[in-house]
Structures are given as structure tokens and as C-alpha cells.
Amino acid sequence: MHKDILAFQKDCFQNYIPTIQKELQDFPKKYVYPDGNPIRPVVPVQTTKNSIILIGAFPSARFERRGKYLIPVADNLSPFGEEKYFDGRETRIQASRESLNKNYFPQLNINPEKIWITDLVKIYLYPEKHIKNCKEVNPKIKYVNTHTMFKKIAQASKEWVEQEIKICNPKLIITLGEIPARVIVLDNKTPNKKLLDGSINTIKLDKEYKIAHLAHPEIRRRNKEWDRYTKIMIKKLSREI
């Protein structure tokens, strides 16, 4: 393990949430799952330098069935990590990673064990649909819809992902999803389809890096038009890398 990677992992694990709390006054001071377990940063563990860095949006969580309610109970093991577990009723997988394995990595000729994989936002974000279930299981906790704060948290996370890019020194940055693309390249104007068309451009940080933006696996699962479009854009990108 490279010392600079380990130093980043430790720093991120210890200080990421405090920096978000400092930047965003409405972010919860105590950020926990329904059982009281702390929500912690999901730090990168697949960290190959001088390769491709893949940057997603934010991690999900591990879920459990409590009666008729499905609730988050623990952090993902790693960004887009391979996960398969029993939730009390059925076996669950990390759906976005499965999509990457089927619909991104083979088409782009990427070996996921030889790249850097991370998320822009490092923590699970509560959407209202999860909060509703969590209140039924443990109403004593004050839950905050942090999913609505995604854009603000992403902007507050920019310096963290820039540190990762500098440590990785990638030959190409690939972002997944609208928000990571817009935050990293400071683009609030380009229409979504043009933004996420897989074209290779450059970004200037400590030096120039090549960067391409694609749609996130989640929107491809929910939207057939985005699925068809992204399939074409991935094919285009594959010819350039």
C-alpha cells in the first residue's frame, strides 16, 4: 500500500463528515442508521495508480428487513464494491456494481481490479422513502433527508475527490452521473445528454487530465432511453481509450 493512499484513506475516514458538517449547517450533527450505528465514509479501497479513475455519485447502504419494512443498517464495504448478502427475506446484491460488470467494464475493456474506483460523495444519503420506513422501526432518531442535499454535499466534497485524482495520477477520469460531472468540471450549463456523451475533454487541477462523463448505472436501470443512449456513448468512448 502506498503511503499517500493510506494517508488519504485515514484522513477521509476520520475527517470527511466533520468537513461536510462545517460546510453545511443543516447537515445532521449525529448521522446514524436506525439501530444507532454511525454512518461513516465509504473510502476507496480499489486504488490502482496511473490508471483510470472511476468516480460515481454516492454509496448506497446494506439493507435489512424488519417485518414489512426495508431499512438501511450499515455502510457499503467500498465504492461500487462486490456485495452479496441476505437481508432477512432474500439475497441482495450491489446493483450498480453488477451493472458496471455487465454494461460498462467489458465494453470499455476495463479490468476493475486495475483501476481506481471511488464516489464523489463518500456517505450514504437518506431519501424520504427510506426515512419513512426508518421512522416505523425506530421513531426516536431524528432523520434528515440528506438526499435533497446531494448537490451541496457534492460541492463540499470536491476537494476530497481532487486529492484522489492527484494521488491516482490517472490516464483518464470517467465520471458517472450528472452531479459528479458538473461539480468536477464546474459546468452548470451543458444539457445532460451532451454532458454525458462520453467525449474526452481535459480538466486542469495540479496539471491537465483527460476526462469523460457517462450516465450512472442507476438511471440506465430506470430509463430505457438513457440506457440506449449510454450504450452508444460507451461504444464511442471505447474507441478512444
Image: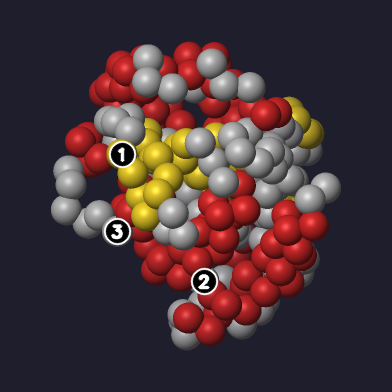
Front one among 2 and 25: 2
Mark 2 and mark 1: Cα distance apart in space: 37 Å
Q: In the displayed structure, does residue 46 sit left or right of residue 228?
A: right
Check disc 3 and report the residue beneath it. Answer: 186
**Quadrant holding the C terminus:** top left
Give the image location of residue 87, x and y in percent: 75, 38
Dot placed on the residue nearer the N-terminal end, 3 or 1: 3
Give the image location of residue 175, x and y in percent: 43, 41
Give the image location of residue 44, x and y in percent: 68, 49
Mark 3 and mark 1: Cα distance apart in space: 13 Å
Between label 3 and label 2, give the one nearer the viewer.
3
Check disc 1 and report the residue beneath it. Answer: 201
**Residue type (three-letter) at the residue carrying disc 1:** Asn
Between label 3 and label 1, give the one nearer the viewer.
1
Dot 3 crowding, Cα within 10 Å, few <14, some 14–19, many 20+: few
**Residue type (three-letter) at the residue carrying disc 3:** Leu
Check disc 2 and report the residue beneath it. Answer: 144
Against 155, residue 49 (above or below) is above
Residue at 57%, 71% in the rendered image: 143
Dot placed on the residue nearer the N-terminal end, 3 or 2: 2
Residue at 16%, 53% in the rendered image: 189
Q: In the displayed structure, does residue 187 sit left or right of residue 214?
A: left
Q: In the displayed structure, does residue 199 sit left or right of residue 132?
A: left
Against 98, residue 132 (above or below) is below
Dot placed on the residue nearer the N-terminal end, 2 or 1: 2
**Residue type (three-letter) at the residue carrying disc 2:** Val
Against 26, residue 55 (above or below) is above
Dot 2 crowding, Cα within 10 Å, few <14, some 14–19, many 20+: some
Q: Is residue 107 visible?
A: yes
* Helix, strand or loop status at disc 1: strand
